[in-house]
Image: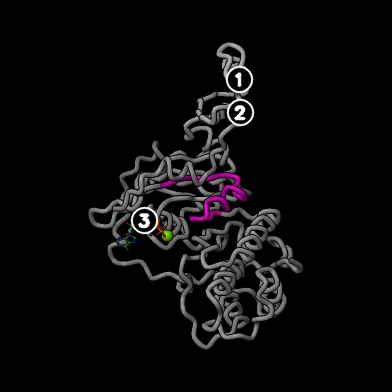
Amino acid sequence: MTNLPPPSGQNGYQPQQPAPHLIDSPPPQVGDIAVLDAGVPEENTHFDPSDAIIQARGLTKQYGTLTALNQFTLDVPRGSIFGIIGPNGAGKSTAFAILATLLRPTSGTARVCGFDPIADPKSVRRRMGYMPDVMGVYDRLTVSEYLQFHAAAYKVPRSEWPELVDGLLQLVDLDVKATASVDRLSRGMKQRLSLARSMVHDPDLLILDEPASGLDPRARIEFRELLIALQDMGKTILISSHILAELQQMCTDIAVIEAGNLLASGSPQSILDQLGDGRRVRVTFADGSVEEFPVADTIEQAALLKRLVVDDQRDVVEFAEVSTDLEGLFLQITQGIVQ
Ligand SMILES: Nc1ncnc2c1ncn2[C@@H]1O[C@H](COP(=O)(O)OP(=O)(O)OP(=O)(O)O)[C@@H](O)[C@H]1O
Ligand SMILES: [Mg+2]
């Protein structure tokens, strides 16, 4: 990973006017841009001056009778890699589209990079790069032209395009495809190009909707490393994924949503601690029987071992803590609700 695009402001390619119509997402439907509910009282809308680059307060999205997102409140700390996990239809893409200025919530408010995505979408788009779950179709453009096209849309000076395009293609490992037609790329390559596209204007914040889908195992690992490198460059990343182990490895914070409701948020470990059914140890006895015991901490573990071996005189051959991972926890706290 050489020739990373320069961090914000280093080469001066600051966009002046992002092009809203170029974002790869269907335009909002008439129902989507229904009048924003002004009914959220100001006193319930606490935007504290903390370092959260995204502050969502009570975001709700109603599609007819379906509540796709219900009172969604979230703080994304600046500099974090923040993962959103949820089953199909949980409301992840809905939340992302609202934060990315593409969808009006039915009610609720948000600040993204310090601006209101509904009242001031241009200021948000200037500082935020969005990668939708499905990339739009661009016939007859080469990979380089595709990035130049978006650089032009974000008013990057033409003289900077060659360096910008080269840097981005190297970053996402697509430089060998610079002259290939976009519609001939493999799915995983399109994902990587879409990520590069989201960065043409050197945003502070990346909102990535399932960016790793379609990537092969090696590409997934490289992708994870790439996101960590971007974090090191000072970017904040909001990412959704179904690949839970992957989120656990790279995310500083995780939120779990289901059927539009936020079930938990915090560091991966704090979620495990809050929502897991606690620590347990699995004990195997000499007769082959296995039993599990709940333990709060290592002191309780030691007390349990003493009780079994000394007090009860049982023949313990193995005594091990049962580890819970995010995947197990996800299955445990979500119920597979589909609405
Ligand atoms: N334009 C729309 N009109 C009506 N219902 C919609 C629309 N977009 C999304 N929904 C519904 O809103 C709910 C949330 O969808 P959303 O796409 O946000 O889920 P998701 O968490 O991104 O799911 P996935 O993991 O499958 O991508 C679903 O029930 C979906 O059918
Ligand atoms: Mg989705």
Within 8 Å of ligand 1, the CB of disc 3?
A: yes
Identify which residue, 260 or 296, lies in the foreground: 296
User: CB under 8 Å between callouts 1 and 2?
Assistant: yes
Residue 305 is labelled as 1
Name the residue tied to disc 2: 319
Name the residue tied to disc 3: 89
Q: Which region shows up in magenta?
A: 238-257
**Residue extending farthest top:** 311
Which amino acid, by three-letter code, is at mark 1? Leu
Which quadrant of the render holds ligand 2? bottom left
Q: Secondary structure at mark 1?
A: helix
Classify 244 as above or below 164.
above
Which amino acid, by three-letter code, is at mark 2? Phe
Q: Residue at x 39, y 60 (%)?
A: 103
Relative placement, left or right, of 27 versus 128 is left
Q: Residue at x 75, y 69 (%)?
A: 3
Q: Residue at x 60, y 20 (%)?
A: 305
Relative placement, left or right, of 202 versus 114 is right
C-alpha distance separating marks 1 and 2: 8 Å
In x, y percent, where is residue 98? Answer: 42, 57
Q: Secondary structure at mark 2?
A: strand
Q: Nearer the viewer, mark 3 or mark 2?
A: 2
Q: Residue at x 53, y 63 (%)?
A: 211
Which amino acid, by three-letter code, is at mark 3? Gly
User: CB under 8 Å between callouts 3 and 2?
Assistant: no
Q: Is residue 158 visible?
A: yes
Does the magenta-highlighted stretch encompass residue 240? yes
In x, y percent, where is residue 258? Answer: 38, 47
Identify which residue, 171 or 288, lies in the foreground: 288
